[in-house]
Image (cartoon, rainbow, N blue to C red):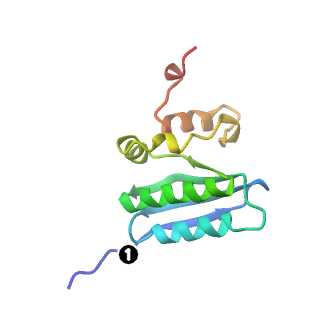
Amino acid sequence: MTTRPQNDFHVTVTPSEADEVLLRLSGDLDYDSADELLAAARDRLALEQVPRVVRLDCARLTTCDSMGLATLLMIERIASDTGAALRLDGRPDFLRRLLEVTGTLDQFAPAPPAESPASADGEGIRQAQQADGRTRSDQGP
């Protein structure tokens, strides 16, 4: 008998601005965990006051399979239908590559610098740019 490894996926809803909701993701976003993320996002988008922005903090994701990607796309569609924007913050390199290879990167716009959690020295902006595969030289003059 084969035992399946325990899924280590967690979604944490973090208080944010009144018109934003922040979901911090950690672990493996895959077939076994996708429903948990979808339910958490739907719950936030079904509130009486729909947030203007739904931010998914992906910095602690360890993997994302095709079901995870399908779930992100579904959340983007639901958010769009309610008038909310979906942002994927702190994208790990593997997630950025997955989005590029599947042609879905443009559906998940990077958070503008004003929305990025930045420290006084601009570290948050630099990390957001690295997560999106950009550098200062890529941005032009």
Q: Amino acid at mark 1?
A: Gln
Q: Is residue 14 visible?
A: yes
Looking at the picture, does residue 34 appear above or below residue 88? below
Question: How many marks overall?
Answer: 1
Percent x, y of residue 124: 61, 38
Q: Which residue is mark 1?
A: 6
Q: Quadrant of residue 109?
A: top right
Label 1: state its secondary structure: loop
Label 1, residues with CA under 10 Å away: few <14, some 14-19, many ≥20: few
**Residue occupying image coordinates x 44% and y 44%:** 104
Image location (x, y in percent) of residue 98: 38, 47
- Counting from the top left corner in percent of width and height, residue 73 is at 49, 55
Q: Is 120 on the left-hand or right-hand side of 137? A: right
Camera-side residue of 65 and 8? 65
Name the outermost residue toward the left.
1
Pick the residue in front: 137 or 19. 19
Q: Is residue 77 above or below residue 122?
A: below
Look at the image and tell me whether residue 65 can be seen.
no
Q: Where is residue 112 shown, x and y percent of the image?
A: 65, 36
